[in-house]
Amino acid sequence: MTRRQFIKKLLITSLHSLSIVSLMPNSSSSAVSADSGPEILHYKPLNGRSLREIARAKEHHNSGGFVNPIGLGRDGRLWEVMKWKLFSENKFKPFFADEQVTPVTIDWNSVREHSGSSVTFLKHASVMIKDVDRNILVDPIFSEIFWFIKDFTPLNFEPREIPRPQHVLITHGHYDHLDKKSLASLNKNSHVLSPLGYDDIFEDLSMKNRTRLDWFDSFNDGRLNITLLPCNHWTMRSPITGPNRSLWGSYLIRLASGYTIYVSGDTAYFDGFEQLGREYKIDLAVFNVGAYEPRWFMAPSHMNPRETVQAFKQLKAGKMMIVHWGTFRLGNEPVHFPPMQIKEELKKEGLLDKLIDLKHGETLFIDS
Ligand SMILES: [Zn+2]
């Protein structure tokens, strides 16, 4: 690299890093020393403690907001983003040429007409869950999030064509999950469920119909039951106000039929999946799989395919599908790698038949 090229890269990277430090995972010095190996833990072991006990003791609360009691506790380090973007080599680069822009088309009529439940993969981590006559929209993202991050799955339809959601679920505040522009296109009276916090954002959006959930809190509308569960992640909107001013979590959604969907949201691996699997019967686990490379940087915040399969086994879920891939290249791996790699990992475990292999725009019809 010439000096001029280096300076150009430095400038672009600084801009990129300042923005994505609010978006991207934390890291830790303990995870920097080596690549992912089974000997390196990217979480704080529970050591026999239950997640419920931790939540009851409010160990995830502090005076300024929240802390991650099961994580490694270093969130949003700008210098580590710089180190990753500027000084580390991306071994996946040769595969970027194979990434394809795939516009998303959805047959909303067949979703509407189906009398049972369904799960539709929109883009990135956005899914629409239909429960008979109710729609639950998770982490709505309808367009790009930053101009310099390419959108590989542009929607081929207007957001207004999306069936109106009765409930909008937000897993956490990272910009690729809580997108004000997408939320602004929804009806202001939509019922928004989020982890605790985010008041300023929803006030700005004039979305007042809200339910704020702490870990293990549930919302019930008489038929549906939605519970926020702990996970190993964090959140940030601005490097100035800092990380974890609001809470994050996974969701457990029990539909009227009793069919139960676990939505991981962003999470690193941790040793609480077994507890959740013991406590809840899960029919479908929707995992976020994407932005998991390089491991020294990503492992404390995002599971890779191997860890996802481990989590799936521990949850004892019936089926699995994956989202958070194919739309934005937020990690080193190309956007089309997660489905290939999850299949390899499932195959190794003899679990390939458990995968619901949905592409963007496709729908899983649960019953008729
Ligand atoms: Zn996140």
Image (spheres, rainbow, N blue to C red):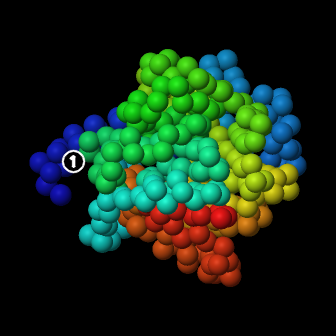
Which residue shows up at 38% across the image and 55% down it? 327
- Graded by Cα atoms within 10 Å as few (under 14), some (14 to 19) or many (20 or more), the crowding at tag 1 reads some
Ligand 1 is within 8 Å of the C-beta of the residue at disc 1: no
Q: Is residue 207 above or below residue 215?
A: above
Residue 165 at x, y percent in the picture: 54, 40
So how many labels did they put on this image?
1
Residue 65 x/y as whole percent: 63, 22
> For this rendering, which residue is in front, 326 or 83?
326
- Whether residue 85 sits left or right of residue 324 in the image: it is left
Name the residue tied to disc 1.
9
Q: In which quarter of the image is residue 17?
A: top left
Viewport quadrant of the N terminus: bottom left
**Up-down relation of residue 349 to residue 225 (above or below):** below
> Would residue 307 be found to the left or right of residue 288 on screen?
right
- The answer to whether residue 234 shows anywhere in this view is no
Residue 358 visible in the shown view: yes
Q: Position of residue 169 (x, y in %)?
A: 58, 38
Q: Please tell me which residue lies in front, 9 or 217.
A: 217
Q: Which residue is drawn at 67% across and 36% down?
A: 68
Residue 88 percent across, percent down from the top left: 36, 56
Between 219 and 248, which is closer to the camera in this rendering?
Answer: 219
Location of residue 332 by image quarter: bottom left
Amino acid carrying mark 1 in the image: Lys
130 shown above or below 192: below
SS of the residue under disc 1:
helix
Residue at figure coordinates x 80%, y 47% from the top left: 46
Instruction: Give the vertical position of 16 relative to 341 (above or below).
Output: above
From the viewer's perspective, tell me whether residue 247 is left or right of residue 183.
right
* Quadrant of the image containing the C terminus: bottom right
- The residue lying at 47 percent from left, 19 percent from top is 206
